[in-house]
Image: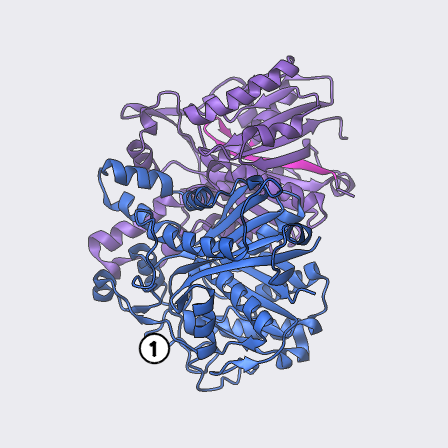
Chain colours: A purple, B blue
Amino acid sequence: MANRTVITGIGVVSSSGIGFDEFSKAFLNKNNCTIAQNNYKLATVKEFSIEKYLPTPKAYLDRSSQFLLAATSLAIGNAKLSTIPPETALVIGTQYGPLETEEIFYRDVIEKGPKFAKPFLFPHCYSNTGISLTAIEYNLKGTHVNIASGMTAGAEALTCAFHLIRSGRASIAIAGGYDVISPLLIKNLELTGLLNNNSFLPGEGAGIFIIENYDQAIKRNAPIKAEILDTRMATKIESAMEIAKDRNINLICLSANGMAEIDNAEQKTISKYLNAQTKTLTYSPKKIIGETFAAGGPLNLAAAICLLTANFKNYPVAALINSINETIDSVCILISLDHFS
Amino acid sequence: MRIVITGMGIVSPIGVGINAFWNSLLNGAYGIKPLSSPFLTNKFQYTQGGEINDELFMHPLKKIDKAASYMLAAAQEAFLHAKLTPSPFFPQEDIGIVLGTNFGNQTALESLMETDKGSPSTNKAIKQNISFEGCTNLIAKELGCGGPKSTLSLSCSSGAAVIAYAAFLIRMGIAPCFIAGGYDIISKFSWAGLSALKTMTTDKLRPFDKQRNGTIFSEGAAAVIIEELEHAIRRGASILAEVLGCSMNNNAFHMTAPDKNGEGMANAMQMALNDANLPPEKIEHINSHGTGTKHNDLAETLAIKQVFGKHAYNIPINSIKSMTGHMMGAAGTVEAIATILSIINGWIPPTINYEQKDPECDLDYVPNKARQQRIKVAISNSAGIGGNNSSIILGVYE
């Protein structure tokens, strides 16, 4: 029999605030930290200091690893987890990983020569650097997966964690996604023309969740935020959205990010869906927090929990969270809020 | 749910294609040679590696990134080997793909870092390839895989992790069939970093030997077709081996320093045994991670002893990295393929360059000559920087 799977902790680092409470407040007021750079806008995280979130100082951390570690620390605190079992699963998604450190490392090699390559920097150049540092920081020896499936990587990580808990392969998981804006990413977005798209707001952040077996969460009196009812990954948005079929959905958090291919595919499918369920609200969190790449799906999930909590009083309520990438590979997550306590 | 392997493909420094690869393994071929790139040989201390012989490897899609071209060739071979042709009874949506890599399409990343303003064609290539899922999308498109796509990056355990992850996705009902593979290339970026870590040797690559003093990195790609047993039977596939159990974990110890007592690798093997619901005594062969570094080989030996106890001394353990070199993100898939071939053919490829017994590494490492031995169940181990581990238990299909 499938185990019920619940979210008990949320850790957010975003342009709309750090920590779920601050994020919720700013997000509901549609506040973010958008900076202008050259002729375009970026939704960036300001006033972030990793020292607040780690018990011991670190010699070097890429900004992306800092975001992941901070969001994990916030999620653990939010879940009121006093001890973290070593068998806890860790499933994290990132599209670009530590691009900034990769560039710093490689520039030395090209401009100064190989003997100037900094050995301490290279271990910080791997896509799995962030997740490995997180495992080390919290002594996490359980199932360990680093997903690099582009913009849907964070949502896929949540899907993987959901299945690990539901199938009984793990009873608790830390899951989500992160990505940061770096000079190399801006260069890539410039070269590929995305920065000329006024509808596309590049952003950065991390969204990390503590996901637990419902019975275990109840047993430890955990603060249950939401239940994950189902998830689906598919190469077509309509296939992924089938998990919402025949269900009463109060809210859909869209993946819409200003990229025509994504927005058109999603809008087409949503339109069909809304004809059947006219009372469903739709919301585009990325208009506020920007396209945060692998953090996009998890931050949409955080936004959905925030919006459901703020806007609905008659529980249960349900939300569908979409995450779609450029090739329309899609991940949908279905959650419900109820009077869990 | 039973899960099986029905196809395999490989591009390696000791052979392109499964038959060439297997013949080289049995004959103890050494794939390490002086590197062909003047940039690498002129500027770096470590000048030997396992490169793909481009005279043997000519992919028709020459315009794609080198890493993607290796991965595509391996995936195509596996696809053909498994006779994986979509039909009305076997829709494209049933075939998913999971690829793993350390460094992705390095040519695109290096271009982006080196170029101030790219040409339109460079820009297109960069757009497609700068993030790791670019290669996965390309292979899926070329082979007509319409099922879920996923990309993992778990350093040098990536090639094994893709098999574990694909098996997990099949068990969760995400899709019944996946192409799972790993790839990486030798590039300026990767070579600079791997050289800086000083884990390589200028000597021969000699895993488990007392004189061992480092690994040697190489490049290539490998893929397997992994599917639910009933699905394979329904479409009339030839079944090569069964995936009995898998694991992916982390040492949670240090980014680069070894977990000297091998606890993380031992946990990975035990997790895979638990997944397979098998006692340690059932394991008849170990295809080791065996990198040739002082610490890894000792830690792995200790891990094997922790898990298997006295039985560890009865298990033939090989390191095919002694022949292929360390194929980074491809290594785990390559070694799973070698394990499957050992099960099918009843031969265990050797650990070559083995000259002096190390009193601390005192198990049976199948030194220098292939050994004929029937195997029913074997385990393949992989590990990587950051403390990632993955173990795959493979068995004869009965």
Using the image, determine if residue B12 lies above or below residue A203.
below
Q: Nearer the viewer, residue B44 or B160?
A: B160
Q: Dot 1, crowdedness within 10 Å: few (<14), some or many (≥20)?
A: some
> Can residue B46 be seen at all in this image of the molecule?
no
Report the chain holding disc 1: B
Location of residue A316 in the rendering, given as x and y in whole percent from the top left corner: 73, 23
Q: Residue at x 21, y 52 (%)?
A: A111
Residue B98, magenta (yes or no)? no
Q: Quadrant of the C terminus of chain B?
A: bottom right
> Can residue B175 be seen at all in this image of the molecule?
yes
Using the image, determine if residue A288 lies above or below residue A211.
above
Q: Residue at x 23, y 43 (%)?
A: B115
Location of residue B209 in the rendering, given as x and y in whole percent from the top left corner: 46, 81
Q: Nearer the viewer, residue B186 or A44?
A: B186
Q: Is residue A10 left or right of residue A153?
A: right
Location of residue A120 in the rendering, given as x and y in whole percent from the top left corner: 37, 57
Q: Nearer the viewer, residue B76 or A130?
A: B76
Residue pointed to by mark 1: B203
Q: Nearer the viewer, residue A161 or A150?
A: A150
Location of residue B125 in the rendering, given as x and y in whole percent from the top left corner: 32, 41
Magenta stretch prevailing secondary structure: strand
Q: Is residue B227 left or right of residue A149?
A: right
Tell me the element at label 1: loop
Q: Is residue B181 left or right of residue A186?
A: right
Residue A7, magenta (yes or no)? yes
Span colored in magenta: A4-19
- Amino acid on which the number 1 mark rests in the picture: Asp
Q: Residue at x 53, y 70 (%)?
A: B288
Using the image, determine if residue B354 lies above or below residue B189.
below
Can you tell which quarter of the image residue B122 is in? top left
